[in-house]
Amino acid sequence: MGDGGSYSLGFLIALVSIASVSRQIEGIDVMNNVVALYFPVLLLFVPIFDMSYVMFLRISKGNSPFYPDRNHIHHRLMKTGMSNQATLWVVYSFAALGAILTALLV
């Protein structure tokens, strides 16, 4: 994904978050605000968790959090013997599950 795709994705996530806050439903306005706060985190759970976990590992080893290594989820799955395509489907499945859960909450 290039700059254009990243910017478009970020814009759409921000737009849905703002739209879910402004949506008025009787009796659950507070719930909409809470869901809107966590919407981007739920939608992007896989990459946020992966980044946080890898940065924690790097810092705990005394390396810079920006030091490249092979501890990301796709590298770890491939070390178990999974093919590129199987690894892709596992990561996509987790991302889809997060998106479905997010859609159910919004």
Image (cartoon, rainbow, N blue to C red):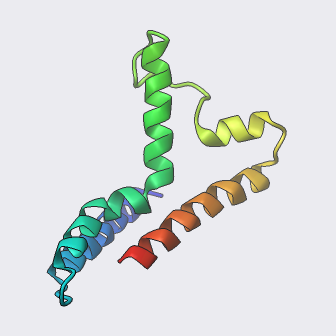
Residue 80, horizontal then vertical, whole percent = 80, 36
Residue 71, horizontal then vertical, whole percent = 60, 29
Up-down relation of residue 50 to residue 19 (above or below) = above
Q: Residue at x 67, y 36 (%)?
A: 75
Q: Residue furthest front?
A: 27
Q: Quadrant of the C terminus?
A: bottom left
Residue 95, horizontal then vertical, whole percent = 55, 61
Q: Residue at x 40, y 23 (%)?
A: 65
Q: Residue at x 40, y 64 (%)?
A: 5
Quarter where residue 97 is shown: bottom right
Up-down relation of residue 25 to residue 48 (above or below) = below
Q: Residue furthest bottom?
A: 26
Compare residues 20 and 47 and report the one nearer the observer.
Answer: 20
Compare residues 54 and 37 and report the one nearer the observer.
Answer: 37
Q: Residue furthest top?
A: 62
74 left or right, relative to 56: right
Total count of labels = 0
Up-down relation of residue 3 to residue 51 (above or below) = below
Quarter where residue 90 is shown: bottom right
76 left or right, relative to 97: right
